Amino acid sequence: MLKQVMIARSRVVVPRFSQFLRVQTIRSITQNGQTYPDEISLDGKTYKTDEWTNVPSYILDLTQRRLHQNPDHPIGILRDLVEQNMKGMGYTFYNDFKPGVTTYQNFDVLGFPQDHVGRSRSDTYYINKDNLLRTHTSAHEHECFRECKTPGYIISADVYRKDEIDRTHYPAFHQMEGARLWSKNSGNLEEIIAKDIEDIPKTNIIVEDPFRENCFSAENPKQDYMTDKEVQLVSTHLKKTVEYLVNQVFEAARKSAKLAGSTEPYLNEPLKIRWVEAYFPWTAPSWEIEVWWKGEWLECCGSGLVRQQVLLNAGLGEDKLGWAFGIGLDRIAMLLFGIPDIRLFWSLDERFSKQFTNGHISTFVPYSKYPGIKRDISFWLPKGVSLHDNEVMEVVRSHAGDLTESVVNIDEFIHPKTGKKSQTYRLNYQSMDRNLTNVHINELHSRVEEDLKKFFDVEIR
Ligand code: DAH
């Protein structure tokens, strides 16, 4: 079975940047009892809301933070580190694509089937039926393939997904997308790619790759328009490029940990990675790379050979072939900088931001750890109904914002007699920069209960 992969995600914090967003008159309840304005203005465009709208204003606020463009923020430092290492290798760097894209850009042009789960309103933030907050940087492949004048490109951007909440997941996170093309008409293609492979700097990574020689199979098929040899060469170029990139990042992390005085044994072992087969609608064959780091395999990058239809959709000729990859930046930055909670990336507290400077991978020094306050919530749903975890999380977030440390579904069952479903969630409220009082949390929590009753007709147990 091929792995269906979605790259590292995350969610929660809510600093207010509403001055950037023109919010119109509030109209009455639209979705699940949530209220949305008639129009949403985002990055100079105005969108009419409709029955698909489900993006809360605190998520729109996050779109203005652009952490990857801040040279002194861990996400920006990591982006910069990759770009410095890829300079001169034939890539154009794109860093200012705005997060509002069309469903065409995010899904259709990449060949996502109509019933793909990623399109659902419980997974994706829709501005309206035809526009959404990009769920991945692949949404910009189309325009980059059209415009890019160099053989390859690297896009870095913030992306958005509805998801459950925990220390490594947040509704806004960052990805880096890379791609590289060749033309079948440019002379001896095999020789050219072989030479390009030679030009990738060597690493001494330990690579586990059962698919390096036999890179496609019935399960992970090649495309007919490419010869076996072309598939072999392009995939080797892809994998060596990603291995080089991963090596540079983790070597930098190792160096800085040593400089900071760490003597942990993993710092002296060669870096180990493995390739596993995967599936993405816009690549074939496809793989994912996992990195062995501090005793576990870290999923970090999806990739594959771009489907010809995607290139044709971008107006390129039938002679073009190439690869693409997408890396989640937040989890890697958490490892590199020793950041224990993804919400810290969004902190506006100077005790966080003052710790980081461009070009340096420094280890985060926790400035405080304030205790969390736990509350369980159990309810019966109307008969035949069940509630998506993301909806519960969304209600909690709409009241508690960045105080939502986690929302975990800890139990569910169906009553044998009534046929009604019971769901129980454990909520942990916690602040990064202050102590919370029980009085405050009780008030927030009762508003969460009220909304669950109002919007979903639940009966609190
Ligand atoms: N967009 C994918 C995700 O978010 C990552 C990805 C996988 C990007 C394969 C690619 C690719 O360009 O070829 O999970």
Image (tube, rainbow, N blue to C red):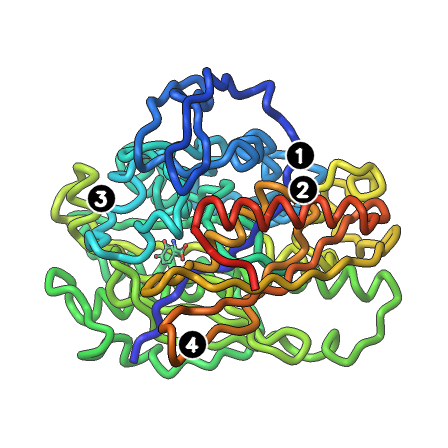
Q: Which of the 4 image quadrants contains residue 323?
A: bottom left
Q: Amino acid at mark 3?
A: Val
Q: Which of the two labelled residues, at mark 4 and mark 1, occupies the earlier sequence position?
A: 1
Q: Amino acid at mark 2?
A: Trp
Q: Which of the two labelled residues, at mark 2 and mark 1, occupies the earlier sequence position?
A: 1
Residue at 41% in and 26% down: 28
The residue identified by callout 4 is: 415
- Tag 4, which secondary structure? loop
Q: Amino acid at mark 4?
A: His
Q: Which of the two labelled residues, at mark 3 and mark 4, occupies the earlier sequence position?
A: 3
Q: Amino acid at mark 1?
A: Pro
The residue identified by callout 3 is: 109
The residue identified by callout 1 is: 15
Q: CA distance from mark 4 to mark 1?
A: 41 Å
Q: Are marks 4 and 1 in contact (CB under 8 Å)?
A: no
Q: Which mark is residue 346?
A: 2
- Tag 1, which secondary structure? loop
Judge by depth and name the residue closer to the eye, 426 or 154: 426
- Tag 2, which secondary structure? helix
Q: Are marks 2 and 1 in contact (CB under 8 Å)?
A: yes
Q: Are marks 2 and 3 in contact (CB under 8 Å)?
A: no
Mark nearer the viewer, 2 or 1: 1
